[in-house]
Image: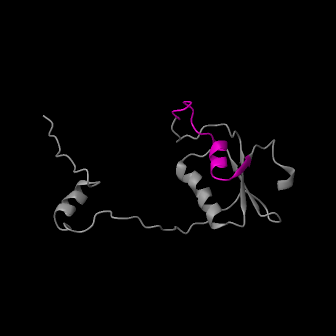
């Protein structure tokens, strides 16, 4: 015989939060706003054209969305530098992306790069002006 757990109130994310929100912390604001924060990390680029301030990142594929977001953060924190991705296959779908309703396909690495303002190429299409 299985016991059913009491339903979690839709207001809270966990049973502990619910107990506290309805008990010891009752009357306090629950998740009223968001705060920005920055994590101090370091990034080592694969290849660099120091003269033109271009960072080259060689990627077979992004394993997670967190890994991909790292480059958005690197770009944001280093506006003097350009990041160029050299993908093994820019048409390869992102592993975590969901299928689009419009065409049933998933976002590709190249589409992600373009959407986030990055240049990209393959090993066979590196622009001479980047070198």
87 to the left or right of 128 = left
For image coordinates 78% across by 44% down, the residue present is 123
* Number of marks in picture: 0
Q: Note whether residue 131 is visible.
A: no
* Quadrant in the picture for residue 80: bottom right
> In this orientation, which residue lies closer to the viewer: 64 or 127?
127
In the depicted structure, whether residue 111 falls above or below residue 129: above
121 to the left or right of 4 = right
Q: Note whether residue 64 is visible.
A: yes
- Looking at the picture, how far across and down is residue 85, in whole percent? 71, 50
Q: Is residue 108 magenta?
A: yes
In the depicted structure, whether residue 79 falls above or below residue 4: below
- Which quadrant of the rendered structure holds the C terminus? bottom right
- Looking at the picture, how far across and down is residue 31, in whole percent? 32, 62
The residue sitting at the right extreme is 128
- Looking at the picture, how far across and down is residue 122, in whole percent? 76, 43
Q: Is residue 75 magenta?
A: no
In the depicted structure, whether residue 36 falls above or below residue 89: below
**Which portion, as a residue range, is magenta?**
100-120
In the depicted structure, whether residue 68 falls above or below residue 30: above
- Which quadrant of the rendered structure holds the N terminus? top left
> In this orientation, which residue lies closer to the viewer: 59 or 106?
106
- Looking at the picture, how far across and down is residue 119, in whole percent? 72, 51
4 to the left or right of 39 = left
């Amino acid at each position: 015989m299985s016991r059913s757990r009491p339903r979690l109130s839709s207001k809270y994310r966990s049973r502990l939060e619910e107990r506290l929100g309805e008990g010891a912390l009752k009357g306090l604001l629950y998740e009223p706003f968001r705060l920005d924060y920055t994590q101090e990390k370091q990034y080592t680029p694969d290849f660099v054209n120091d003269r033109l301030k271009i960072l080259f990142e060689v990627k077979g594929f992004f394993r997670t969305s967190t890994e991909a977001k790292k480059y958005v953060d690197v770009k944001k924190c280093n506006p003097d530098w350009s990041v160029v991705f050299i993908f093994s296959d820019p048409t390869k779908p992102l592993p975590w992306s969901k299928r689009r309703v419009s065409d049933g396909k998933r976002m590709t690495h190249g589409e992600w790069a373009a959407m986030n303002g990055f240049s990209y190429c393959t090993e066979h299409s590196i622009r001479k002006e980047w070198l």
